[in-house]
Amino acid sequence: MDEPTLTGSLLVATPLLEDPNFRRAVVFVVDDDPAEGTLGVIVNRPLGLAVGEVLENWSGVATEPAVMFSGGPVGTGAGLALGMPGGDHAPLGWRPLEGAPHEGSQVEGLGVVDLDTPPEILGGALGRFRVFAGYAGWGAGQLADEIDEDAWYVVPAVVDDVFSAEPESLWPRVLRRQGGDLALVSTYPDDPTLN
């Protein structure tokens, strides 16, 4: 039997995770391979830099807010883009996520966009598009250890998480929609010493 994959899920930082790179982060898992490791992007950290300032030709394609996002602490000099076709066909320069999505996730049609593809060819075929500077990465077994240490909640993703118009409020919203104890965690104060 195959091991369950985390591809297409969200990793939501627990209040105990104090690493400044991931404090209150919501990470969308782009690829999870038990032998190779896990790659994801932080979807709730918009940067104050318009997509057009970095990738001029892609400025008219980006989903609002049309800014670059800090995808994570690894490879910050490179971009990783996610998108959804606006129609029924898979356009050139777009590929779906590998494998079946995490149980409960609703990310059908979400995939990786090759930024080397001319936007004139691909841009009009995309209904949604977001660019991340850098990514979050874990070696084989590393993320499983962090989950076991209560650093992350693993929850199903929906497409609107990745393309949220209000990314700064994503951490409490994702937790709240889980219900139960996680909904209660969504009210955890940013600085508990001020409570």
Image (tube, rainbow, N blue to C red):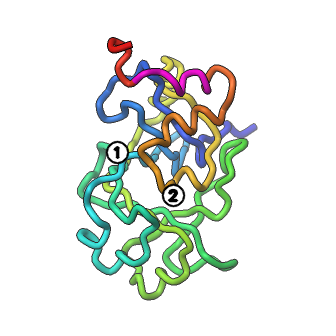
Image quarter (top left, top right, bottom left or bottom right) of the C terminus:
top left
Q: Which residue is mark 1?
A: 72
Compared with 153, 56 (above or below) is below
Please state the horizontal and vertical placement of residue 96, each as a whole percent of the image. Answer: 59, 64
Tag 1: amino acid: Gly
Residue 194 placement: quadrant: top left
Outermost residue to the bottom: 120
The magenta segment is: 183-189
Answer with mark 2 or mark 1, whichever residue precedes in sequence. Answer: 1
Tell whether position 89 is magenta.
no
Work out which quarter of the rendered image holds the N terminus and state it. top right
Dot 2 falls on a residue whose secondary structure is loop
Label 1 residue SS:
loop
Picture mark count: 2
Q: Which mark is residue 142?
A: none
Q: State the mark number for residue 163.
A: 2
